[in-house]
Image (cartoon, rainbow, N blue to C red):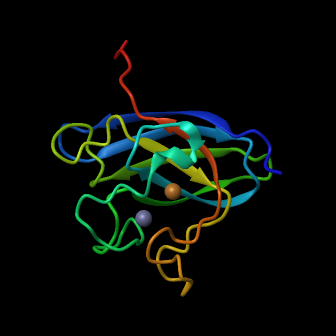
Amino acid sequence: LEPKVRGTLQFHQDPKGGTNIRGRISGLSPGLHGFHIHALGDTTNGCNSTGPHFNPLKKNHGAPSDNERHAGDLGNIVAGPDGVADISIRDMQIPLTGQHSILGRAVVVHADSDDLGKGGHDLSKTTGNAGARVGCGIIGLQSSV
Ligand code: CU
Ligand code: ZN
């Protein structure tokens, strides 16, 4: 059984374009873990209520660097031997304002690695075959201090 996954992430929209995500997640197994924005900010049934990958453009699952990707596809995060992943991601498809805003949606961490659409598995083109949802949180507003 996966130990308790927890952490805090901060999302900042760059006025010049793009969104930066910074933070730390602990309690993971060492290695790669799929990391996505899912469509729904709903955790009434835990992470399973967060819906599919955020996909406003109706594309197939892919790598963050691919043209064919879900907007929510952020690839993998890497946990060290201590189970901690330090996260610093910049992405152009996850704005915090406008029609495709991710505000009110969820960030999800998976038990397994995301194959980035290239694993040849039945689930590769929809979820990256990243396995169970071991941690999630709703993306909300915080005072800018
Ligand atoms: Cu996911
Ligand atoms: Zn996806």
- Residue at the image position 38 percent from the left and 28 percent from the top: 140
The answer to whether 1 is drawn above or below residue 143 in the figure is: below
- Residue at the image position 17 percent from the left and 43 percent from the top: 16
The answer to whether 2 is drawn above or below residue 33 in the figure is: above
Give percent across and percent down for residue 107: 47, 44
Q: Is residue 12 left or right of residue 29?
A: left
Give percent across and percent down for residue 58: 26, 67
Q: Is residue 107 left or right of residue 13?
A: right
How many numbered markers are drawn? Answer: 0
Residue 92 location, quadrant: bottom left
59 and 63: which one is in front? 59
**Which quadrant of the rendered structure holds the C terminus?**
top left
Residue at the right extreme, as displayed: 1
Residue at the front extreme, as displayed: 45
- Residue at the image position 66 percent from the left and 63 percent from the top: 112
Give percent across and percent down for residue 54: 35, 55
Residue at the top extreme, as displayed: 145
Give percent across and percent down for residue 138: 46, 34
The answer to whether 97 is drawn above or below residue 93 in the figure is: above
Q: Is residue 38 left or right of residue 44?
A: left
69 and 65: which one is in front? 69
